[in-house]
Image: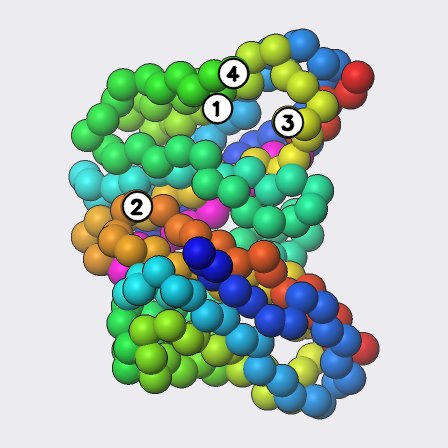
Amino acid sequence: NAGVTQTPKFRILKIGQSMTLQCTQDMNHNYMYWYRQDPGMGLKLIYYSVGAGITDKGEVPNGYNVSRSTTEDFPLRLELAAPSQTSVYFCASSFLAGYGYTFGSGTRLTVV
Amino acid sequence: AQKVTQAQTEISVVEKEDVTLDCVYETRDTTYYLFWYKQPPSGELVFLIRRNSFDEQNEISGRYSWNFQKSTSSFNFTITASQVVDSAVYFCALSEARSNTDKLIFGTGTRLQVFP
């Protein structure tokens, strides 16, 4: 039972580069989320999805994009990376509202 | 608007001391869920407990206990006889049932350091 798998674990990007953070879950969860964690700031919601084909913006969506073509996958795309996007990114999924999340292990991204 | 406040940024204790982590929340919903997560130095986020707004019973799990008080909008977390392995950042979080999206609003976390 893999749970929520995120790749890569670490990445260094140059300003202006693009990349996709991958997130896959094998629990057949409908709800999926992307959060970023900045030091001392807690976790902020970037995008979320309540099912395949349905996505919506969270609190801090600027500079990011998502898609949800299958129940299992919820990739996060960074276009034109900026130093402000240096952060730790967590993907999460949940089965039902109010039951709590299963988190991936995180991706530490540095933009230089 | 929803909000979660963890006023304690950092707490340091010596092993075997009891410690309470405070969490105060704001919501206009009558049905909501509260959570605590632990983030050890390795960085992963570990689910500790879930509480719905209709269940004000306190909960105890080993050395961990939680005190939910709707009257003061608080959901505090106590570790009894703390151990070095309890050193971590602890997050309190809130989700509202009305939206049916299960979005979690997190507090800024409390860093607990337990010294031997």
Viewer-side label of 1, 4: 4
* Callout 4: chain: B
Residue A71 position in % (x across, y down): 32, 73
Residue type marked 2: Tyr
Range shown magenta: B101-111
- Image quarter where the C terminus of chain B lies is top right
Among numbered discs 4 and 3, the one appearing first in the sequence: 4
* Callout 2: chain: A
The quadrant in which residue A27 appears is bottom left
The residue that disc 4 covers is B63
Determine the main secondary structure of the stretch shown in magenta. Answer: loop
Dot 3 crowding, Cα within 10 Å, few <14, some 14–19, many 20+: some
The residue that disc 3 covers is B86
Measured in 3D between alpha carbons, the distance from the residue under mark 2 to the one under mark 1, in whole angstroms, is 19 Å
Same chain under badges 2 and 1? The reply is: no
Residue A61 position in % (x across, y down): 48, 74
Same chain under badges 4 and 3? The reply is: yes
Q: Is residue A38 left or right of residue A53?
A: right
Q: Is residue A91 magenta?
A: no
Which residue is at a point 34% across and 84% down the rendered structure image?
Answer: A69
* Callout 3: chain: B
Residue type marked 4: Arg
The residue that disc 2 covers is A99
Q: Which mark is residue B77?
A: 1
Which residue is at a point 42% across and 65% down the rendered structure image?
Answer: A25
Among numbered discs 1 and 4, the one appearing first in the sequence: 4
SS at badge 1: strand
Measured in 3D between alpha carbons, the distance from the residue under mark 1 to the one under mark 4, in whole angstroms, is 11 Å
